[in-house]
Image: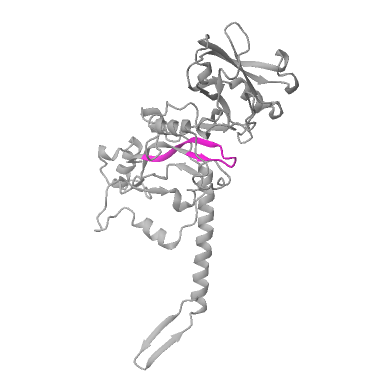
Amino acid sequence: MLPAVIWISLMGLAISRPSLNYLENHFTVQNESKEVRSEAIKRLLEVFGMEDPPAALVRGHKQPPQYMLDLYNTIADVDGVTKDPTLLEGNTVRSFFDKLHSEHVEFLFNMSTVAKSEKILTAELHLFKLRPQASLTFNRHHFCQVSVYQVLDSSKKNVSQGKKLLSSRLVPIHSSGWEVFTITQAVRSWMSDEGSNLGLLVTVRTLAGLQMDLKSVRFASGRHHHHSKQPMLVLFTDDGRRAASLEITAKGSDDFPVGPSLPFPSLPLPATARRSARSADYDDSGEKMPCQRLPLYVDFEEIGWSGWIVSPRGYNAYHCKGSCPFPLGQNMRPTNHATVQSIINALKLTKGIETPCCVPDKLFSINLLYFDDDENVVLKQYDDMVAGSCGCH
């Protein structure tokens, strides 16, 4: 319903229709707001290395693997900020579930969501070993040889020509829990030739080399066991987005490394934003406030991304605000260049030289745990997402 301006007079009530200019301005602002939001979301997706957001999942329908949750909690705090950048190999970890669901110990993983430009660092096959059945508890064997093969020819996988050994080791027969095998070589070959992905084959033999009964050594499958024990491929990659964007932090700090800063063209600001930008260095009392770090919370639910992001629900990016007046104290963390600029401005030696700006001088990375379009769980680290401190530059 269109708004109306209601005029009240002593003679009674008179209702006037909105003017043409009002309507034009009203709908122009609405359209501009939609365009700005659309462009802002597009730019935010670029920051997170995506063209489109993954499809939202019905929460509770799909649970992330416990391994991925534990890994996330190891490298990130409650806000997703990286605890220690050396803990994670590369900047991306993906988990894939078996697509074959075979009665035999064979597995097939769809790797199509991995970009060919990504550097494959490590690939692991995670298998959950079940306890032996009660009737086989007194098996005279204490260890078995578990071997993982890359299938080269589906018609010859039971002979040596049809498979390639990737990993092999001794496993206690009476144990239960996760067993991890390195299969990096196979995944690299699959990435170079997608058609060569014919899956993996696992064999279990005695120390003498004899084939063991699969009832003696059992691994959980996606068909008959709880989803928390499903066979899983975990892939560590690097997408090449790491680079130093703040030279002062990269060269002179032992804190977190910093990464790329995307060169986005600026968006036109509405008049209200331009007015607030001019008075940004003043507090509510009209006093100039010194350069400092202030909160800036990014809420993924408000953005509309809560349907596919597992953790965090949002994070505090912080922002820098305040003035850099002469003389610059060490508490403002000025660079030598900023100090010189401040002096030139104070002495008015050169026309048009402004005071230094209050900007982030240390940036931290955050981690995102989310479902991709194929419902694989991805853990990704993004550099330069949190202002760790502010200074006059």
Q: How is the image coloured?
A: one colour
Instruction: Determine whether 58 is above or below 130 in the image.
Output: below
Position of residue 288 measured from the top left corner of the image (x, y, whole percent): 26, 53
Name the foreground residue: 9 vs 258.
9
Q: Which residue is at a point 58% across and 20% down the rendered structure image? A: 215
Q: Is residue 96 above or below residue 189?
A: below
Question: In the displayed structure, does residue 54 sit left or right of residue 198?
Answer: left
Q: Main secondary structure of the magenta part?
A: strand
Q: Residue at x 42, y 49 (%)?
A: 299
x then y, percent, for residue 231: 56, 28
Q: Of all residues shown, which one is farthest toward the top? A: 208
Magenta residue span: 369-387
In the image, farthest residue toward the right: 155
Furthest residue in direction bottom, as rendered: 11
Tell whether position 41 is magenta: no
Quick one: 287 or 63, which is closer to the camera?
63
Q: How many marks?
A: 0
Give the quarter of the image for residue 360: top left
Q: Position of residue 260 (x, y in %)?
A: 48, 36
Write down the quadrant of residue 363 in the picture: top left
Name the one closer to the observer, 202 or 103: 103
372 in the magenta segment? yes
